[in-house]
Image (cartoon, rainbow, N blue to C red):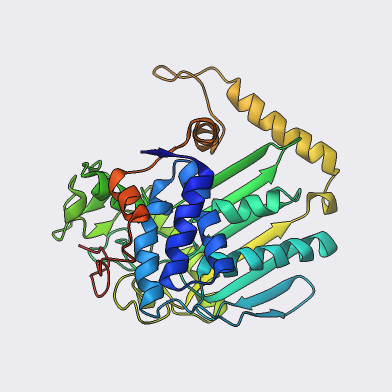
């Protein structure tokens, strides 16, 4: 089922509002989810709405949060999200980081006590559209076996980066520190499709292609991905005085409770380090240089990091976003949620 950005935004906003989220907050969450879907990252898009609606309905998302923003230094601050919708708190925190960076050249803003905040690329692009460099990291619930281990400790712990080129050009990079994000497993489940055996392991620690048998994910590049997810956990958990490692709350365990997650935004103003026009020109040149590199056998051309999602976004903007029928049927239905997620194991089997 293909739907326009506007239609999908309306459907998501309406469903979340009916679940109990304020109109303003539902609008922001819908904006972040549609951003993911239009870029082809369906694991962080509309397929998440029913889970959000169930958590909102059961009180695990504070529908009237009292955000508290506190400057802790000239370039640092912390926003307490009061366990409201993570998307709203993260967006507000990035807006504050942008303002600080424009004044001081650098900003580091932590976001404490929030729920799931969706695709990090949304927030780093928020900075890049202001002519700044954006970096964002966030923790997630333990579902990844550490290198050499047989049980989960860290989450998928994503990292995102965006920088402005000339005009409206942005170079955006957003990755989980696992071979694939957990949401990709959910997307495979929703389509009843197998997954590559390099993504995850079953209860025995053996690679599996069945998304319904996944018991833990694998870090990218073995010990290197393991190190990166540790770094993210320190920056978005330990640094902010929040639960960390295998103490991080499960997405599904108890939907009546807030999740107390953490996120960290780092923003740099290039004009404090170099000539801004030259910087943006050179970002665009980097993008074109990479596109101009001779492709290896089996490849049509070299893409700059994140360009595959840029191309998907261009196509979806023009032709509508492909949404799984099951997800679309839920969005247009009168059902708020189907009580499908509460008190499930971390993998929501």
Depth check: give the residue in front, 305 or 116.
116
The percent position of residue 167, horizontal first and vertical second, equals: 76, 35
Residue 234 visible at all: yes
Comparing 97 with 231, the one in front is: 97
Residue drawn where x is 78% and y is 66% of the image: 100
Image height of 127 relative to 345, above or below: above
Q: Residue extending furthest left? A: 204
Q: Is residue 75 left or right of residue 306?
A: right
Instruction: Indicate whether 234 appears above or below 300.
Output: below
The percent position of residue 280, horizontal first and vertical second, equals: 77, 38
Observer-nearest residue: 152 or 319? 319
Quadrant occupied by the N terminus? top left
Report the label total: 0
Q: Position of residue 242 (x, y in %)?
A: 49, 80
Give the side of residue 56 with respect to residue 342, left or right.
right
Q: Residue at x 42, y 62 (%)?
A: 15
- Residue at coordinates 46% horizontally, 18% vertically from top-left? 300
Residue 258 placed where, x, y %? Answer: 42, 80
Identify the residue at the far front of this view.
334
Q: Is residue 219 left or right of residue 109?
A: left
Q: Is residue 141 visible?
A: no
- For the C terminus, the image quarter is bottom left
Residue at the spot 38% in from the left edge and 64% down from the top edge: 155
């Amino acid at each position: 089922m293909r739907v326009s950005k506007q239609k999908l935004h309306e459907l998501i906003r309406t469903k979340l509002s009916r679940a109990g989220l304020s109109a303003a907050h539902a609008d922001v969450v819908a904006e972040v989810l549609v951003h993911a879907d239009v870029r082809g990252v369906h694991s962080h898009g509309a397929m998440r709405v029913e889970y959000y609606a169930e958590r909102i309905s059961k009180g695990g998302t504070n529908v009237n949060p009292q955000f508290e923003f506190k400057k802790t230094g000239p370039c640092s601050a912390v926003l307490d999200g009061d366990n409201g919708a993570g998307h709203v708190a993260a967006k507000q925190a990035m807006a504050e980081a942008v303002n600080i960076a424009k004044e001081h050249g650098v900003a580091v803003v932590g976001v404490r006590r929030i729920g799931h905040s969706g695709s990090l690329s949304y927030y780093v692009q928020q900075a890049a559209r202001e002519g700044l460099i954006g970096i964002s990291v966030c923790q997630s619930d333990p579902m990844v076996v550490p290198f050499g281990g047989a049980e989960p400790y860290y989450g998928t712990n994503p990292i995102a980066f965006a920088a402005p080129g000339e005009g409206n050009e942005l170079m955006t990079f957003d990755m989980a520190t696992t071979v694939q994000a957990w949401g990709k497993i959910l997307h495979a489940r929703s389509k009843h499709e197998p997954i590559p055996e390099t993504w995850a392991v079953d209860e025995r620690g053996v690679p599996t292609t069945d998304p319904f048998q996944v018991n833990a994910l694998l870090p990218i590049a073995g010990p290197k991905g393991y190190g990166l997810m540790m770094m993210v956990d320190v920056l978005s958990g330990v640094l902010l005085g929040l639960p960390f490692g295998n103490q991080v709350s499960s997405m599904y365990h108890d939907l009546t409770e807030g999740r107390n997650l953490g996120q960290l935004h780092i923003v740099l103003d290039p004009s404090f380090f170099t000539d801004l026009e030259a910087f943006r020109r050179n970002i665009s040149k980097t993008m074109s240089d990479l596109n101009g590199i001779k492709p290896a056998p089996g490849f049509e051309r070299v893409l700059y990091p994140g360009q595959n999602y840029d191309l998907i976004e261009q196509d979806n903007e023009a032709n509508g976003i492909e949404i799984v029928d099951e997800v679309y049927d839920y969005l247009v239905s009168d059902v708020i949620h189907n009580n499908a997620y509460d008190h499930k194991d971390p993998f929501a089997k």
